[in-house]
Image (spheres, rainbow, N blue to C red):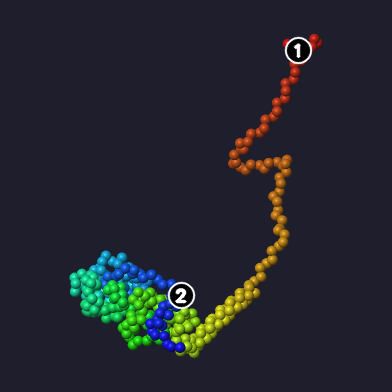
Amino acid sequence: MATPSKAQLLTNVHDLLKKRYKPKADPHPGRLTVLEAVVYGICHEGMTRDAAAKALARFKSDYFDWNEVRVSSLVELQSTLAGFPDSEGRARRIRKFLRQMFQKTYGFTLEVLVKKPLKEALKVLGEYEAFASDFVTATVIQQALGGHGMPVDEEIRRPLARLGINEPDAASLRSTLERAVPKNRGVEFLGLIEDLAHDTCLPGIPECPRCELRKICPYPQQHKDELQAAASHAKSASSKGTAAKEKEIASSAKDRAHAKEAAPAKPAKSASKPATASPPVAAKNAPAAPAPAGAKPSSAKAPKKSEEPAPPPAKGKSGRPRS
């Protein structure tokens, strides 16, 4: 079977990765300015495109203008790049670029270069230290100048090298990609490779069994023993971890059992409650207790005796009552 060309291989890679990863929308559907593309490129190198887009948005929203960024301290710029590796180096490169631009143009726009031929524009931009990075140069070509640029960093080089696309440096690999991948698919292709690099094609030992490219990638066959050893080691470590966890659970249960046996026995509760003595009932006719000395007499009044009816008047012989 004939070995596919690099263009055909990359086309197959693109098609397979689209099945695994849903292509994300371009974070910059419109064209960036040259300045914005430089800042975005510095933030994107070694990071995801989403993180770089958010960092660029913070620079545009948290500062009054780019002049404020130029005069800000490195500590302030690093806080905007919180979570980025080498945040101090990135902050220094961004501020250096803005200061060089201000010294050369007394402003913060390079849009006049957009109308120039690409080679002429790149010759002018080459005077800035930020363009010592081929990744930043390709980003500006792709995002601001309207050319076919394929930014390549370590996250892009690693999967491509395992696929057999090796070049001595990033610039040579970029040229290879620009010839093999059409311009209208460039942004999407790099996004899919970036997703692969952060999912299965990791640094060190990749997770080839989960990779969508395992059937066309030569790396699993070339490093079969190494991958099997890594999988065996991972399985052994997992088994040891499970055994240690089970041992810990058994030991904890045993300790609870010993603690329960060593605890003093609690007295058994009586089934019947003790009878409670009821207060003595006072006799009905018992004499009242004498009032203590100095106590006030009770305000209760004694009940009145019922009055007897008057006797009827005596009657005379005639039966009439006597007057």
The residue indicated by pointer 2 is: 19
Residue 230: % across, % down: 49, 86
The residue lying toward the viewer, choosing from 317 and 204, is 204
Residue 182: % across, % down: 35, 77
Residue 278: % across, % down: 70, 51
The residue indicated by pointer 1 is: 321
Give the number of the mark in front: 2 or 1: 2
State the image quarter where residue 307 is shown.
top right
The residue lying toward the viewer, choosing from 150 and 108, is 150
Can residue 182 be seen by looking at this rendering?
yes
Can residue 82 be seen by looking at this rendering?
no
State the image quarter where residue 153 is shown.
bottom left
Q: Amino acid at mark 2?
A: Lys
144 to the left or right of 201: left
Quadrant where the image shows the N terminus: bottom left
Question: Most extreme residue toward the right, as rendered?
Answer: 317
At x 54%, y 85%, the residue is 236
State the image quarter where residue 121 is shown.
bottom left
Q: Quick one: label 1, few (<14), some, or many (20+) residues within 10 Å?
A: few
At x 26%, y 78%, the residue is 130
Q: Quick one: label 2, few (<14), some, or many (20+) residues within 10 Å?
A: few
Kindly report the distance in space between the C-alpha atoms of the residues bearing marks 2 and 1: 136 Å
Query: Could you say whether the residue bearing mark 1 is in a helix, strand or loop?
Result: loop
12 to the left or right of 74: right
Q: Is residue 244 above or below residue 316?
A: below
At x 61%, y 38%, the residue is 297
